[in-house]
Amino acid sequence: MKVALFVPCYIDQFYPQVGIATLELLEKLSCEVHFPQGQTCCGQPLANSGMEEDARPIYEHFVQTFAGFTHIVAPSGSCVYHVRHHYDLLGDESEALAVRSQTYDLVEFLTDVLQVDQLAAQFPHRVGLHQSCHGLRGLRLGSASELMEPSFSKVRYLLGMVEGLELVQLDRIDECCGFGGTFAINEPAISTKMGKDRAADHQRNGADFITSNDMSCLMHLEGVIRRQKQPLQVIHLAEILNGVVR
Amino acid sequence: MSEHAKKAANFIADEPRTDWHDESLWFVRTKRDRAAASVPEWEQLRQLASDIKDNVLSNLDSYLEQFEAQARANGVQVHWAKDAHAHNEIVYTILERHQAQRMVKSKSMLTEECHLNPYLEERGITVIDTDLGERIIQLLEEPPSHIVMPAIHLKREEVGELFEEKLATEKGNNDPQYLTEAARQHLRSEFMQADAALTGVNFAIAETGGVVVCTNEGNADMGVHLAPVQIHSMGIEKIIPRAEHLGVFTRLLGRSATGQPITIFTAHHQRPRPGTEMHIILVDNGRSEHLGKKDFRNSLKCIRCGACMNTCPIYRRSGGHSYDNTVPGPIGSILSPNTDLEAHSDLPFASTLCGSCSDVCPVKIDIHEQLYKWRQKIVEVQGLPAAKQRALKMTGKILAKPKVYQNAGFLARNFLKVAPRFMVYNGLNEWGKSRELPEVPKQSFRKWYRRNRRS
């Protein structure tokens, strides 16, 4: 299957290993992965700050870059949610509609499109799963704790295929990490406190690693953990699924 | 820094207290979860409630007229108030006619919104809030910090000290039962002396012309049953079409608010008792205008359960007063810009857009979507602080041009790599004050890709 890889801007710049893991994992699963070189960003930082109109050229550029691919995959629930949901600004133009509906978070691409049922991955550690809000409540990658519906989680399903991995039970299973894009800068006190509380939940329950399908949440949690010198590490889901051994 | 951010930082400065506040509200959220889970058709109920409210908002004019006609036929005096001032004037006129000196009032966010208490007090009328939480904050001269639990920000020791000063309770006695009994005795004498009683309204039924008031303390009923004049103040959006719809909402309200199957008292007031007067005041105060805003109108579906506050990770850690609005939290952040966008423009930004509020809402208001839309509106109307807007505009230009983006990324990464710590973690860096920045990798993904995958 031919797949276009979208590597969000901050992953490209700060977490290249996440892009590499995603690429390698997709290749292992027999995808022909393309990385359109002109790609930049989904435009979310501007739009969430209320500057949706200034983000329009970014949206148009994104659509132009990825038009023609039937599957666009990114290791970020938040960016995918933004493309799928907030590119409604571009109206009913067919190319934009196609790109929106064909952009997938890595998790749902693995479970829903490739329908993966086994992976050759080992990760013999105690892991806490941080649910990204946009992945969970935006893309509905799992059941949210607020909704009274049958419980499911596409991320847990995938982690269940990893040998040796032990998922720890958290006290609050899907509370926000406090990143929120520019919120982290605009409301530093609350944002940091939310991050501290989230990291503490993982630590209290015995996790050695925090994983998530969103690197932006992990970037925030990592910033808090390193400042507090907590014995925790963050690792993107793609790295675990790709079989990185630590 | 925004007003909310400043007030939040102030609240968080006392971290143990913040944790206590967060835990108290999270406890209510988990109670709500258990109560909701006990109803197999919970999600269908939410949908039904949302649909009924959508119908109401689309036919509000005719339901209001039907309600008015029915209430008048029941012998109720119906008044229309176009704004807060008109509402307060109507209340005062009624009280004046009856030479009322003391009025007892059950919880009503609408009268908070209209600032009724100071209006009446300036005119020599004593107003006694009779909901326990409301009475506590009234004695403290503070606004409510939550719409269902107005004094949730206070510890019992603080209530003990307050009662010692105001109600002459024993020094140092913080026993909740003792304090509640003291409040009960105090309020009882107020009920007996009251010349008039005012209540808020949870639901008004168009078909019957009756209003429904939900409380846990029976204080609304106690006031209304004893006073010769009863007044019910309601926002015009409180209408539901028929009595048979009420059960949908009462099943959702108590469970969403506090995790109770139903509020302890659900009182139906339909007509005045012989020899007394019953008034209903229908208040607009910006609601008609709000109804005309396509993207924002469905926030008028709100039944004031407070579930979005209990679930909000920001509200729980910043306290209700940080919002500086009668209705705080997520719902307050989308209601308040309707009435005064300038004054409340910081509130839609006081969110990570995590979406928990929308999923917990019993009438399915798309709260986090509206927060996002308000942000667009606010920037359109008043812009962002100049420096921030310039920086973001520059970012936008960079991100629309791949060549420029690649160079900018290279510069940013390399600046982080070589800059000394004090330059990266300086006072201007709101991230770096409390969190480490990401470690800088040797190369970007793009560079790796060129080396490893492209010939």
Image: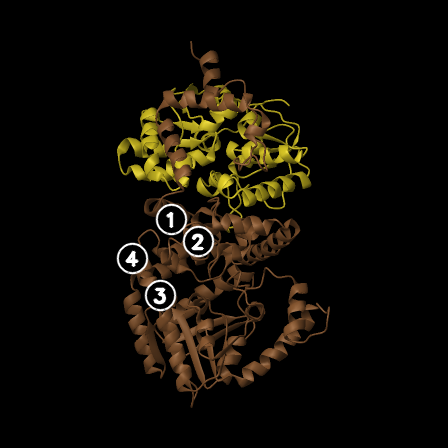
**Outermost residue, top direction?**
B455
| Chain in brown (letter) | B
The residue wearing badge 2 is B333
Residue B156 coordinates in the image, percent (x, y): 66, 64
> Which of pointers 2 and 4 lies earlier in the amino acid sequence?
4
Q: Please say if the residues under marks 2 and 1 sit with CB atoms less than 8 Å apart.
A: yes
Chain drawn in yellow = A
**Would you call the spot at circle 3 few (<14 residues within 10 Å), some (14-19), or many (20 or more)?**
many
Density class for disc 4 (Cα within 10 Å; few <14, some 14-19, many ≥20) is: few
Say if mark 2 contacts mark 4, CB within 8 Å.
no
Tell me whether the residue at label 3 lies in contact with that at label 1, contact meaning CB atoms closer than 8 angstroms: no
Q: Single out the mark in the foreground, 4 or 1.
A: 1
N-terminal of the pair, mark 4 or mark 1, is: 4
Give the chain letter at badge 2: B
Disc 4, disc 1: CB below 8 Å?
no
Q: Are marks 3 and 4 in contact (CB under 8 Å)?
A: no
Secondary structure under badge 2? helix
Question: Which residue corresponds to the image point at 50% horizontal and 39% vertical from the top-left?
Answer: A185
Mark found first going from the N terminus, 2 or 3 = 3
Q: Is residue B28 found left or right of A70 in the rendered image?
A: right
Q: Report how far apart the C-alphas of labels 4 and 1 lie in the structure.
A: 15 Å
Q: Position of residue B284 (x, y in %)?
A: 34, 67
* Rendering quarter of residue A138: top left
Residue B292 is labelled as: 4
Disc 2 residue type (three-letter):
Ser
* Residue B441 rendering spot, x and y as whole percentages: 54, 21
Q: Can residue B282 be seen in this view?
A: no
Determine which residue is flagged by label 1: B374
Q: Earlier in the sequence, mark 3 or mark 4?
A: 3
Indicate the chain on which mark 1 is placed. B
Residue nearest the observer in this picture, B272 or B314:
B314
